[in-house]
Amino acid sequence: MLVFCAAANLLSCKEKTSDSDIQTSFNEKSRSDGRFPNITATVNNAVVTLSGQCADEPCRTAAEQTASGLKGVKSVVNNITVTPVQAPVEISPDSALQKGVTDATKDFPGVKATVSDGEITLTGEIVKNRLPVLMQALHSLNPKKINNNLVIK
């Protein structure tokens, strides 16, 4: 009977993992993994709350699985937002822009356009309802900037 009571006492007093130990474990795993550089974890009463940003849903899920797999974690609150990395816009060279601008403005006789250092500068006159058509065509050429100095009729 004494052995049974001693064994029950040992089982009921098993060591509980502290919040700081859980947080340290997550920080170590996230640093060694490399997929979660923008993720932070806070731990309160063995509940891990994740916050920050991931590039995609698999990253978000992996961070949650990493946290839930740690010793002593009761649950995980996943507040990570998915913000995909956007590729930088490729600015067209002046020679390609000039050709595209010439094609785009051919149907707008009152519009004159010049290209310099990736920027298109518009001068002249245009009818108001035709301006969106012209601007859409020019934006599709991927200039750095469009300087619109047109007089709108």
Image (cartoon, rainbow, N blue to C red):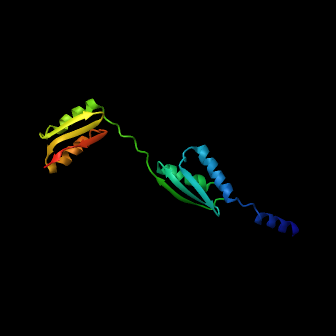
Q: Give how far across and how far down residue 129 sits, in percent.
A: 15, 51
Q: Residue furthest right?
A: 2
User: Foreground residue, 150 or 57?
Assistant: 150
Q: Which residue is found at the position 62% from the left and 54% from the top? A: 69
Please state if 142 lies on the left or on the right of 30 as rendered: left
Q: Residue furthest top?
A: 95
User: Foreground residue, 103 or 17?
Assistant: 103
Q: Which residue is found at the position 65% from the left and 64% from the top? A: 45
Please state if 53 lies on the left or on the right of 149 as rendered: right
Q: Give how far across and how far down residue 115 sits, in percent.
A: 25, 34
Whether residue 71 can be seen here: no
Q: Give how far across and how far down residue 128 sits, in percent.
A: 15, 50
Q: Give how far across and how far down residue 130 sits, in percent.
A: 16, 47
Quadrant in which the N terminus appears: bottom right
User: Foreground residue, 1 or 21?
Assistant: 21
Whether residue 102 can be seen here: yes
Q: Which residue is found at the position 48% from the left and 54% from the top? A: 81
Question: Which image quadrant for residue 107?
Answer: top left
| Numbered circles on residues, count | 0
Question: Which image quadrant for residue 71?
Answer: bottom right
